[in-house]
Amino acid sequence: MAAPAIAAMTAELAKVGNPSSLHASGRASRRVVEESREAIADALGARPSDIIFTGSGTEANNLAVKGLFWSARARDPQRTRVLASAVEHHAVLDPVEWLGTHEGAEVSWLPVDSTGRVDLGQLQSILEEHGESIALISVMMANNEVGTIQPIAAITELAARWDIPVHSDAVQAFGKLPIDFSTSGLSAMTVTAHKIGGPMGIAALALRRGVAPIPLIHGGGQERDVRSGTLDAPAAAGFAAAARWAVARQEQVREELEKLRHAMVEGVLSRVDGVMVNGADSPEDRLPGLAHFTFAGAEGDALLLLLDANGVECSTGSACSAGVPRPSHVLIAMGLSEQQARSSLRFSLGHTSTIRDVEALLDALAPAVTRARLAGQS
Ligand SMILES: Cc1ncc(COP(=O)(O)O)c(C=O)c1O
């Protein structure tokens, strides 16, 4: 966590008071929650009343996907279709699939190009054919594996012609890209605290005025009757401090991370052969601070463990299903083969990363790739 977020959260932890209570301690706690809501709204270009606190980004995505599908279908029974990009995080992918399996939704996955960007031509033809029956479109703002930024403005503009609500998972974009919810055309947008230097266990769904998803969780109705559960004032304070901190440093960090990423990509390409860089090339089309490579002939999981033993922590992006590792659906959607997807790794840089970290990776990488390739041959 970022230092300002730790300070803001710990200052609240020992205080008594439920934000829904009417007594003085409750009111003091409510003030913390509402000031935090204002700061988060400010960082997102939203209004404070747009912000619904949830327990995780996963919960916010589930609320948006299921809740907006249910409410659109309740208003107009012919709206039974859901469109989502093929590269969504599992926190969107799985609720969309669940709607298909349990609620009779017809699901269309929007294809992406080789960089992971949604194909707007395909979106337009699906809308022309099925626009009247679409309940919801969900496309993430930036991808968590390869960092590709999606054309959200073009998507919301198209969707508006058929009056379709659009949700975007902005978990990876928040704190890294400028976000203005008010002009985005989005009906709903997910952000989570732990990706911007805040605590785990708190997130938010920004919901435009008048957009009312059917709740997943019923109870006290604390958050606009859309989400129930006692609000966590210390976590909200930590989230708000992280949001202020991350957005204020966004431009400077972007430049620093871009330099580090450049050093990492150049270093990897010059020291290891048979490497492919995945995702968009130009800095305007991707997140800073994230680089994704395919190391031909090396098993990603083996490489990850070899690097881990050298103090370098990275990610394969593969999901484990019933104990069997499956190659990343993101890379498959971008056209990589299963073998290429299994030979791929993501390296993420953050606000504490330095050029020494990049050098440590470069020193460890070439011998690790050689060993992983040899292990693959035996
Ligand atoms: C793009 C994206 N969406 C959603 C999530 C889930 O957020 P949370 O961990 O708060 O449930 C993540 C977390 O890794 C993510 O990267």
Image (spheres, helix red, strand yellow):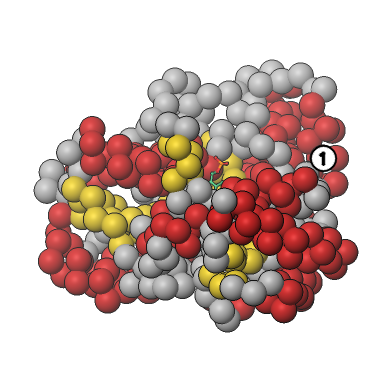
User: Which residue lies at the image location 27% right of the left edge and 76% below the top edge?
Assistant: 121
Query: Which image quadrant is residue 24 in?
Result: top right
**Residue 142 percent coordinates (x, y):** 52, 63
User: Which residue lies at the image location 83% right of the left edge and 32% below the top edge?
Assistant: 10
Q: Residues within 10 Å of mark 1 (few under 14, many from 20)?
A: many
Q: Horizontal placement of 232 versus 131: left or right?
A: right
Residue identifier under label 1: 6
User: Which residue lies at the image location 63% right of the left edge and 34% below the top edge?
Assistant: 201
**Residue 30 percent coordinates (x, y):** 66, 31
* The furthest residue to the bottom: 282
- Determine whether the residue tagged by mark 1 lies in a helix, strand or loop: helix
Q: Is residue 298 above or below residue 207?
A: below
The residue closer to the viewer here, 232 or 60, is 60
Residue 165 visible in rendering: no
Q: Quadrant of the N terminus?
A: top right
**Residue 207 percent coordinates (x, y):** 45, 49
Ligand 1 within 8 Å of the CB at mark 1: no
Q: Horizontal placement of 234 versus 75: left or right?
A: right
Q: Amino acid at mark 1?
A: Ile
